[in-house]
Amino acid sequence: MKKIGVLTSGGDAPGMNAAVRAVARAALAKGMEVVGIQKGYVGLLEREYFEMTARSVSGIIQRGGTCLYTARCPEFRNMEGVLKGKEVCQELGIEGLVVIGGDGSFRGAGDLSSVGIPCIGIPGTIDNDIQCTDYTIGYDTAMNTAMEMIDKLRDTTQSHARCSVVEVMGRRAGFIAVNVALAVGAEAALTLERPYDLDKIAAKMIRTRDSKGKSHFIIVVSEGVGNVENIARTIQEMTGIESRATVLGHVQRGGSPTVRDRIAATELGYHAVQLLEQGIGNRIVGFKDGKVYDIDLHEGLAMQKPFDNERYDILMETAY
Ligand code: ADP
Ligand code: F6P
């Protein structure tokens, strides 16, 4: 291929910039031209793009967010939008496209591949909820941010001998919740993947307070499980322990990417360009058993990702 495009789509994730940088630098080094498409599929349809040089991606490897901006594009969910996207690619001479985003963005990439524009998906989402890869860009940074904030929260929770019920992000996935809960020494993680019983959690809190002298408690709740204000109120009613709710929110999506995210993004970006260079599209690049690999886009999206059940069990058994 002589000319490729790159875009970021869906929710942003720390490390997306490192991936954009790797794609641009690898492609330019191989003699390809690179087009940076802004605001995801919205920018593709509206022709918001610029020709990238090595300097277009200078000084971004350490920055959170995405220098290409990101968006959600309802028009791209139907074939009319996808065919318009194909037309724009042909008009600009874009022979292949790298799409950095989550599973929704990959469905769009699959559609575009099926109409003749080979696309490669790079998993970029803090949720780590892409089925065919062990790891998604942004997950480590988001967990570190959540962990640091909950560590701060613990200070005041301890001072007041309270229970803090903390909501973390993760849309439909509890990976952030269970791993952060483990890292902060929480009493429990409430996730959609594992059934939980608030009565049992409350009874354990009372037991550990009365027999083991535990004075304060942290409960991490995955977004989507329920309203944390209500959960905190219920726990307070059940235990008599004063409880407060905290929603960490979008702060988890920001900040400078960790070493892990920068390296993962760079490896995946490089591999994506290698595929396009060979004329290969309709693939997702990811990690399997610690190694970079690629898989057919539709096959990858149809896979099931196992939950971190062992970690969940360790958390619940060591929390007292
Ligand atoms: P993510 O990629 O983070 O999962 P979304 O689900 O919001 O984020 O998807 C991002 C964009 O990808 C959507 O706004 C839309 O343009 C495109 N997209 C999502 N689902 C589909 C689909 N089923 N078919 C085609 N394009 C889709
Ligand atoms: O998918 C990433 C994510 O941050 C989810 O964890 C969260 O539910 C969602 O995006 C929030 O999306 P928005 O930025 O549209 O509020």
Image: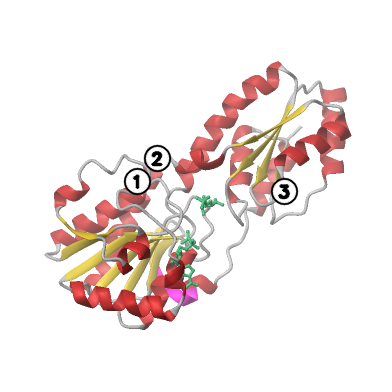
Which circle, 2 or 3, is nearer the viewer? Answer: 3
CA gap, disc 3 and disc 1: 33 Å
As drawn, the label of residue 226 is: 3
Magenta range: 294-299
Which residue is denoted by mark 1 in the rendering? 262
Is residue 118 at least partly visible in the picture?
no
Q: Is residue 302 above or below residue 286?
A: below
**Residue 320, position in %: x, y?**
76, 32
Q: Residue at x 53, y 30 (%)?
A: 148
Mark 2 Cβ inside 8 Å of ligand 2: no
Residue drawn where x is 76% and y is 36% of the image: 232
Distance from the alpha carbon under mark 2 to that under mark 3 = 30 Å
Q: How many marks?
A: 3
Q: Quadrant of the N terminus?
A: bottom left
Give residue 269's quadrant in the image: bottom left
* Residue furthest to the front: 46
